[in-house]
Image (cartoon, grey):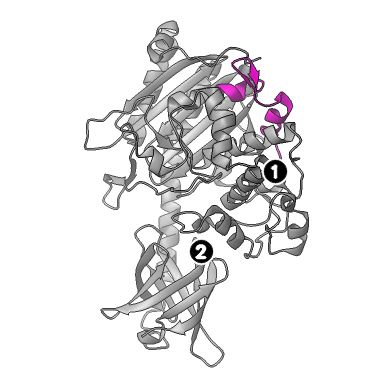
Amino acid sequence: MSTAPRWPGALLGLALCFPPAGAAATARAEPAADIDAVVRDALKAWGVPGVAVAVVRGDQVVYLKGHGLREIGTDRRVTPDTVFPLASCTKGFTTALLAMLVDEGRLRWDDPVRKHLDWFHLADSLADRDVTLRDLVTHRTGLRGHDLLWYRSPWTPEEAVRRAGLLPLDRPFRTAFQYQSTMFTAAGLAVSAAAERPWHVFVKERLLDPLGMSATVFTSTDAEKSADRAAGHRVNELGNVVTLPTAAMTTPDAAWTVHSTARDLAQWVRFHLGDGRAGGKRLVSRRNLEETHTPQMAVPLLGVERETHPETVQLSYAMAWVVQDYRGEKLVSHAGALDGIRAHLTLVPRRRLGVVVLANMQGTRMNLALSNAIVDHLLSAPQTDWNRLYLGLRDREAEKAAERAKAWRASQVRGTTPSHALSEYAGRYEHPAYGTAEVRIEKGVPVWRWQSFSGPLEHFHYETFILHDPTLPDTPVLFKPGPTGEVGSMHVQGLFDVEFRKVKALR
């Protein structure tokens, strides 16, 4: 579900007509053969069913190929035209549109958000007064992720943004980087207001059509019309790779709903490596395109980030792109992750190199390992075994997670019972942003429901229960007393970390 970035930028005057994959491979047979080997090694090391890869050098696509299966248990192969959800790689389309509107004088990077969305608010008075468009697209509003406002959400993009405005800030305004997709949704709504047309219509008119990205669509509904579409996968509790249901994205959202192919994304990468022109026509100024690749917020290189980026001294977030030093080069990238799919785009602007990786496995770092390995090959840099490095990191993280879970289970006070009869926990609970959750007793077991999520509540100790939902990690739920000792509220921890107040008993 997570949509965290990579951790979780010569003229382009020629028409964007790429040579066929076969022609590209013929023109650079040796590099293509080398990249084939790198991709095969990565697929084998990580057990990923399939991947589509594109490599751009200068104004040429030098590699464009699919490997493996787009769905296990079938003979359907990944191709350069296999459609994948991009998740957070969608965000780059939104900031490119903002850059165009800045060129046209219809908005400025540092416009107050309410200049374009008069209904927009944040709960903190300082942030509410001063928040700008730049703040929205650099993850510095002070609001943490709250991914469940958009993931499997029943709300429209505007409603999700309104609800986010009811949440307290987790860090002081503009003091910390906290990845927050719903603020990008707000930026897309500001684009729509300034452009006087829906965000997705503007993307198609100003980016997809000029760049020839004809296979790129904005919802899962449109993606399902393609016969060549990737299925998501994960490793289940038994260690087997299984398919996942397609993530439903029925309404275009500027933060996460674009679907595309390696062939189309090669054109997108090529555009970003250029000066803002396509087919001899300027789409955006070089200055404002490069502004989207310019560091805005530092990302601390601590803990797992330090281990993930051993060749990096400074890591920053720009506007829909992560920027870092890498082997003496500026490297610009972004990743996307959603329900069994990983997307990864990488640019080395000074060398005019670009890499697209689209894979169909959840929770894997293969996308980063493969991207790094290809970049190293293109730079003729010392070869690092990125698969081994990141697999080791994965195993260490798994061990630490198991230790934390074991320690938490060991903290259980055995022999305790809930303070109330189970029927007294049943009820309707409300939260200003998250809306209504319910607890009902079914066959003697309390069952928790919120939107499309549901699962039984297992008593842990005292007033703490564990929510077992097939999608969410096991989540502690702490019930708290009201003023007269009755069940008054429940603090749902984990991805929620919010408190729902009981408003009605249910029998």
Q: CA distance from mark 2 to mark 1?
A: 25 Å
Q: Earlier in the sequence, mark 2 or mark 1?
A: 1
Tell me if residue 208 is in the magenta stretch: no
Q: From what the image shows, is residue 37 above or below residue 392?
A: above
Query: Which residue occupies the foreground of this view, 109 or 363?
Result: 109
Horizontally, is 235 left or right of 388 in the view?
left
Q: Position of residue 153 (x, y in %)?
A: 46, 57
For residue 297, the mark is 1
Horizontally, is 209 left or right of 407 in the view?
right
Q: From what the image shows, is residue 62 above or below residue 257?
A: above
Horizontally, is 241 left or right of 175 in the view?
left
Mark 2 Cα-neighbour bin, 10 Å: few <14, some 14–19, many ≥20? some
Q: Is residue 201 visible?
A: yes
Q: Is residue 309 visible?
A: no
Query: Which residue occupies the foreground of this view, 386 or 121?
Result: 121
Query: Which residue occupies the foreground of this view, 213 or 66?
Result: 213
Q: Residue at x 62, y 48 (%)?
A: 189
Q: Residue at x 45, y 60 (%)?
A: 404
Q: Position of residue 115 (x, y in %)?
A: 75, 50
For residue 496, the mark is 2
Q: Residue at x 71, y 46 (%)?
A: 133
Q: Which residues are magenta?
A: 270-296
Q: Residue furthest bottom?
A: 484
Q: Secondary structure at mark 1?
A: strand
